Each structure stands twice: as structure tokens, then as C-alpha cells.
Amino acid sequence: MFGILRSLLVRSGIDVYMFDFIGSGKSDGFFRDKTWSKMRQNLGDMLEVIFKKHDAQSGRLALIGRSVGASIAGYYIADSRIACSVLASPVLLLTEQFAPYRSPSIDGYVQMPASLERSGQIKGDWMLNEQFFDELEQAQLQLCDAVTGAARVLVMHGDGDPKVKTKHSEALMQLLAEPKQYVGVSDGDHYYTGHEDEAAQTTVSWVLKYLT
């Protein structure tokens, strides 16, 4: 979906910045190094780079994220410099979503179950450190505070998403202010498989509404 989305945005005249969180893709570290505070800092650092390169007061930046990426974006969507946001398959109820995966650690790391499907390009072993789980409760409280009253947010969720239930998006919608919109993708899974064009076009239409 993101490859299609990137092409659509660029063809629409929108500059696109994409990055990998710590321990994923081309970024430093290993997957086991991820914590909520580190991922939040990753996005914060990226935004500062963009704000310095462009007019920080122009309000010409849109935030787009999926899954945990949408959760991390949620911490920043109320920033006055953000024109609008698209949160796809967001995880809002962090403790409910992730706490069940915590098991006795080995040297401070928790092995993720083999049955849990991996998302993205993970670097290193399929495990998370204890700090990731220790931060869940506080991270959820901070996330809910951050999104409460935020506006110009499109929330998108696949009706058939087996990984992140639609109740996360429904709870998020209750906290947002107008203008806001919820789009349910019929039979869409967590990756919008077979619905990539639809999801990308919906995202671009919302972004162009506020950036042009």
C-alpha cells in the first residue's frame, strides 16, 4: 500500500518523507530494541528535520501511519504545524493489544510467539525487551491524551483485520474532534491486501483536501 500511496502523492505534487523505526528496515538497532519512547523519539526527530527544512509555521504537513506507526503518529497529530492526518489500522488500546504477549523474559527480552505474524522488515531476533511492555500503560494514557480533541483526522480500518480489531479505531473516533472521518474497508485485512489502491486513493483524497 505504501508504495502505491507514495507514487500517488508524488504525482499529486506532494513531497513524501518515509522512514523506518528503530530495529526495522534500514534504521539502526534491532527489533528487540524497540520501545514506545524510542519510536516516539524517532518520529519526533524526523518531524524536526522536516520542520527545519521547510517553513515550520506553514501547516503544510500531513502525517500518515499504519498500525503501530499510526499509534506513534497519534502523539503528534494535534501539533499546530500538522495540517491533517491519516491513521490506518491504529492501535489505541495498547495494553490490551500487547500485554498478552508478555512472557517470562530471558536476559531482559521476551520471545514473541511464532504464531504471531511479523510485520515489516524486522532486524534481528523476533523478541522485544521488557521496557516495551513496562511502558504500555503510560504510553496508552499519553496517546489518548494526545489524540483527544485533535481534528482533521481520517481513520481507516479494514473490516476483516484479524490483527488489530476495529474497536481500536472506534474508540479513537470518540476522542477526535471535527472535522474527522472514518472509512471502513470492506473485507480489508491489516495490510489492505487487494484493497491497496482503494486505501491509497482514500488517503490521498483526504491529504489533498487540506494541503491544496
Image: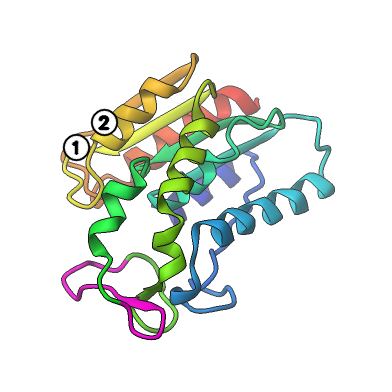
At a point 67% along the width and 46% down the height, the residue shown is 15
At a point 58% along the width and 34% down the height, the residue shown is 77
Q: CA distance from mark 1 to mark 2?
A: 6 Å
* Relative depth, front residue between 58 and 108: 108
Q: Is residue 55 above or below residue 21?
A: above
Return the residue at label 1. 159
* Relative depth, front residue between 3 and 99: 99
Q: Residues within 10 Å of mark 1 (few under 14, many from 20)?
A: some
Return the residue at label 2. 184
Q: Is residue 206 left or right of residue 107?
A: right
Residue 191 in view here: no
- Percent of width and height locating residue 127: 35, 76
Q: Quadrant of residue 26?
A: bottom right
* Relative depth, front residue between 133 and 28: 133
Res 131 label: none
At a point 41% along the width and 48% down the height, the residue shown is 137
Residue 106 in view here: yes
